[in-house]
Amino acid sequence: MKTFMAKVGEVEQRWWLVDASDKVVGRLSSDIATVLMGKHRPTYTPHVDTGDYVVVINAEKVQFTGKKWQQKLYRWYTGYQGLKTETAEHRRDRRPELIVEEAVRRMLPKSRLGRVMLDKLKVYAGSEHPHQAQNPQVMKLGNRDIGVA
């Protein structure tokens, strides 16, 4: 019995549609990262991109548990001294798709392969998306409803 190792271009990549309405950000993001890496398939190979494309809609309706909307801070470096900071609530009002993108990005490998995987994630604040031609199939992710506030 030989171990199967996928080769580049050998795996057919599918398109999935995920509705983020009333889903907890961390639980949803970990499930999305699993699909992007390809760990949901029996043919998963660590050094090959075996993941699928994921289209996330309604990113503006995601939830955090507890008081994270007011207490969670996003920080980034601008090139000048000091860091820019904003709360999760402010980011939801400004660019809600960035909340999901950043959460997923931090769960993927920190390498060239991880950046390729992140390119397969498409996040939209509303319910409309321009990927109807790819015919994405609906996938339910982040369904554990424990601790939703």
Image: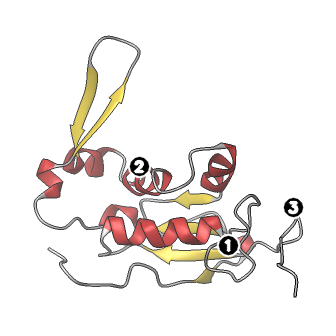
Q: Between 123 and 35, which is closer to the camera in this rendering?
A: 35
Secondary element under disc 2, as helix, strand or loop, is helix
Task: Kindly identify the amino acid type of the residue bearing the numbered disc 1.
Answer: Gln
Q: CA distance from mark 1 to mark 3?
A: 26 Å
Q: Between 38 and 96, which is closer to the camera in this rendering?
A: 38
Residue that label 3 marks: 8
Residue 147 relative to residue 30: left or right:
left
**Res 70 seen here:** yes
Task: Kindly identify the amino acid type of the residue bearing the numbered disc 3.
Answer: Val
From this view, report whether residue 144 is shown above or below residue 88: below
Horizontal and vertical percent position of residue 120: 65, 58
Q: Which mark is residue 79?
A: none
Residue 73 relative to residue 129: left or right:
left
| Res. 77 image quadrant | top left
Residue 133 relative to residue 16: left or right:
right
Please tell me which of labels 1 and 3 falls first in the chain.
3
Mark 2: few, some, or many residues within 10 Å (few <14, many ≥20)? some
Residue 51 relative to residue 64: left or right:
right
Q: Which mark is residue 98?
A: 2
Please tell me which of labels 2 and 3 falls first in the chain.
3
